[in-house]
Amino acid sequence: SRPIALITGVGRSIGIGAGIARRLAASGWDIAFTYWTPYDRRMEWGVEAGAAEAIAKELAEAGARTAAIEADLTDPDAPARIFDEAEQRLGGPVTALVLSHAESVDSGLLDTTVEAFDRHFAVNSRASWLLIREYGLRFRGAPGSTAAGTEPRTPTGRIVALTSDHTVGNLPYGASKGALDRITLAAAHELAHLGVTANVVNPGPVDTGWMTDDLRESLIRGTPLGRLGTPRDTAHLVDFLCSPEGQWVNGQLLKSNGGAAA
C-alpha cells in the first residue's frame, strides 16, 4: 500500500540523495534508488564500500521495501531499464521521481574539454530529461476531477529535481544544471494533465565531503544562519513537496539554502 519513490544519485551514505531516501522511507514510501560506483571512483572521496547495501538495509529498517539499482546515466537506454527494474522489484509504478544525481568536475570557460562538457550534459541534462519522459509515459495515477462543483484536482504524482547555481569555475556543471531546471519546469506544464507536479530545489552549500576547510569557512560566513546545509535540510523540503500538503507548489525553483549569499 506504500507509494514508490525513485531517487537517483544515492551512492554515498552522507550524500543528499541518501538523506532524501531516509526521509521518504520514514514518511511511508518504498524506495528504488540508483548509484554509479565508477563516478565515485573518479572523485577525490573515492568509493564507499558497501554503501548501497547499507543504505538499503537502513531504509528497510524504516519499513520500506527497497531496490538498489546501479546505472550509468551516460547511457541513453539506462532510464527505461531503471524504471523496468524498479517496477519489477517493487511491484508497482513509480509515484515520485527525485533527481539528485550529478556529474560535477570543476573546470572553467577556458579549460573545460569537449569530453567533460558532453559528459556533464549527458548525465545532468539528457538523463534527467529521459527519466522525466519515462516517468510521464508510464505514470498511471488518477488525475482527479476539475468539473464544476467538485473539489480541485489533487495531483497524485511528483517530480523534484535538485539543481545548483554554480557557474564560475564550474562551467559544465552549472550550465547542465541550468538546462535541468528548464526541463523540470516544462514538466510542470506538459504533465499537468496527468496530475503531476514538478519542482526544482536548490539546496545551497551542503558539505558532503567535497569542501575544503577554506571554502567551508567562507560559505559559513556568507550564510545568515551561520552554518552549512545538511542532507536532512534538503530532505525535509523534498518530503513536503512529495506530500499531499505540498500539492499546490508547482513549477517552482525553490532555494533551501539558509539565505546564503550568491
Image (cartoon, rainbow, N blue to C red):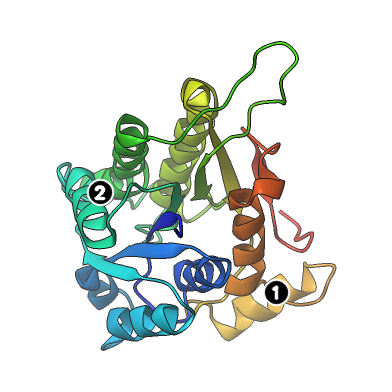
Instruction: Pick the residue in front: 68 or 8.
Output: 68
Q: Residue at x 52, y 47 (%)?
A: 160
Find disc 1 in the rendering and name its residue: 218
Q: At which x and y percent is residue 120?
A: 32, 49
Near-viewer residue (164 or 114)? 164
User: Which residue in the protein does label 2 denote?
Assistant: 83
Residue at x 35% of width, y 78% of height = 56
Question: Left or right of 210: which side holds 245?
Answer: right
Q: Which mark is residue 16?
A: none
Relative to residue 114, is residue 68 depicted above or below?
Answer: below
**Residue for point 17% across, 42% down:** 76
Q: 10 Å neighbourhood of mark 1: few (<14), some, or many (≥20)?
A: few
From the viewer's perspective, is residue 255 above or below residue 223?
above
How far across and down, in percent of the image, does residue 190 sit? 47, 21
User: 132 and 202: which one is in front?
Assistant: 132
Earlier sequence position, callout 2 versus callout 1 = 2
Nearer the observer: mark 2 or 1; the answer is 2
